[in-house]
Amino acid sequence: MADDDQPLSVKVGTVVLTVAAGWVAQKLVGVIWEKATGSAAPTNVDDDELSIIQAVTFAAVSGGVAVLAKRIARQGAVRAGARFRSPAS
């Protein structure tokens, strides 16, 4: 489905769910990172004290989780929009 074909409710729902999912994903990555490495998740990947391996790993994990969260949020918004648009049985 093209973005132009989506009703406004799906677009707004996608934005809201994406922001919420991104926040949850950020917190989840931070907790997992801290448990796996024993140190807090980096807030600045350009920090000279952060090794290049850690910076790249954190960026890859964060990016992957962000994409996953966005896709799940969009699917949820589309399903919710379809449920509200479909006539009651």
Image: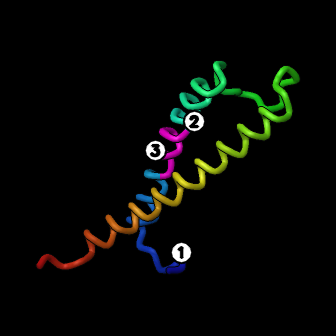
- Residue to which mark 3 is pinned: 20
- Residue 27 at x, y percent in the picture: 52, 32
Label 2 neighbour load within 10 Å: few <14, some 14-19, many 20+ = some
**C-alpha distance separating marks 1 and 2:** 29 Å
Left or right? Give the position of 69 relative to 83.
right
Q: Quadrant of residue 82?
A: bottom left
Mark 1 touches mark 3? (CB < 8 Å): no
- Residue to which mark 2 is pinned: 29
Q: Residue furthest left?
A: 89
Labels 3, 2: front one: 2
| SS for dot 2 | helix
Please say if 52 is above or below 64. above
Q: Magenta stretch?
A: 18-25
**C-alpha distance separating marks 1 and 3:** 21 Å
- Residue sitting at x 44%, y 52%: 17
Mark 1 touches mark 2? (CB < 8 Å): no
Q: Main secondary structure of the magenta part?
A: helix
- Identified by mark 3, the residue type is Ala
Labels 1, 2: front one: 2
| SS for dot 1 | helix
| SS for dot 3 | helix
Please say if 17 is above or below 56. below
- Identified by mark 1, the residue type is Asp
- Residue sitting at x 86%, y 33%: 52
Q: Residue furthest front?
A: 36
- Identified by mark 2, the residue type is Val
Label 1 neighbour load within 10 Å: few <14, some 14-19, many 20+ = few
* Mark sitting on residue 3: 1
Earlier residue among tags 3 and 2: 3
- Residue sitting at x 56%, y 31%: 32
Please say if 82 is above or below 15. below
